[in-house]
Image (cartoon, rainbow, N blue to C red):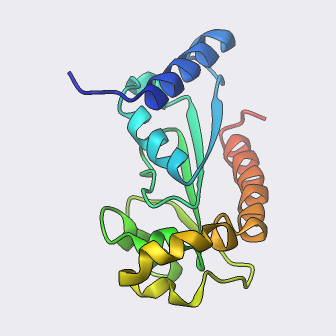
Amino acid sequence: SRYMTIEVELLVANWRKSFADLGGCKGHNYIVHHAHSAGSELTLQALTYLSDEEKLHLIVFSYGAEGMIPADACALAINYVHSGDLVPHAKEQRQSDYVIAAINKQPTPGYNIKVVDDGSRAPKGRRHLGRVYELWNHMSDCHPLKEGYLSGILDSQSELKAWMTQREII
């Protein structure tokens, strides 16, 4: 059996309690989950512990994460990234290539990635990966890039409404 961190265990337990409170995974019972930064990484891990039925009743919006939630991981998954965010530029592993592709307006097969950009930028050295540790001190200046991610949060409401309307839920 795999090791499950307490954070992932609590997230899975919270989702399952929410499903129970809704009367189970049936009909139009959906949980909407918002995750930011490292919380998106925990969300990605927690998804592996859900049944296929549970995943079909979970909607995830991720903001400013290095690890992207795959489009087919749940009922709806949208990843918002800011073009000036340090996190996707500082990590050269896993799905970071998809983030860079999205920022460069290239296709991201298997991932629904939306780029938000309010004109703010991370510190100038963000592309120099050798200086990453120095840049973490400036994290509050460049992450979560409040105004840019606020537009992502507002967009997620529109995306959710459109998704629900398309499925005749509302």
Q: Work out whether residue 116 or residue 87 is closer to the camera in this orientation and state it.
A: 87
Judged left or right of residue 103, residue 95 is left
Q: Position of residue 108 (x, y in %)?
A: 41, 69
Q: Is residue 167 above or below residue 78?
A: above
Q: Quadrant of the C terminus?
A: top right
* Residue pictured at 44% horizontal, 72% vertical: 133
Residue 135 seen by the camera: yes
Residue 82 location (% of width, % of height): 61, 72
Residue under the image location 41 percent in, 87 percent down: 128
Q: Is residue 12 left or right of residue 150?
A: left
Q: Residue furthest left?
A: 1
Residue 114 percent across, percent down from the top left? 59, 67
Whether residue 107 is visible, yes or no, is no
- Is residue 103 positioned above or below 5 on the image? below
Q: Is residue 170 left or right of residue 137?
A: right
Q: Residue at x 49, y 31 (%)?
A: 56
Q: Position of residue 115 (x, y in %)?
A: 60, 72
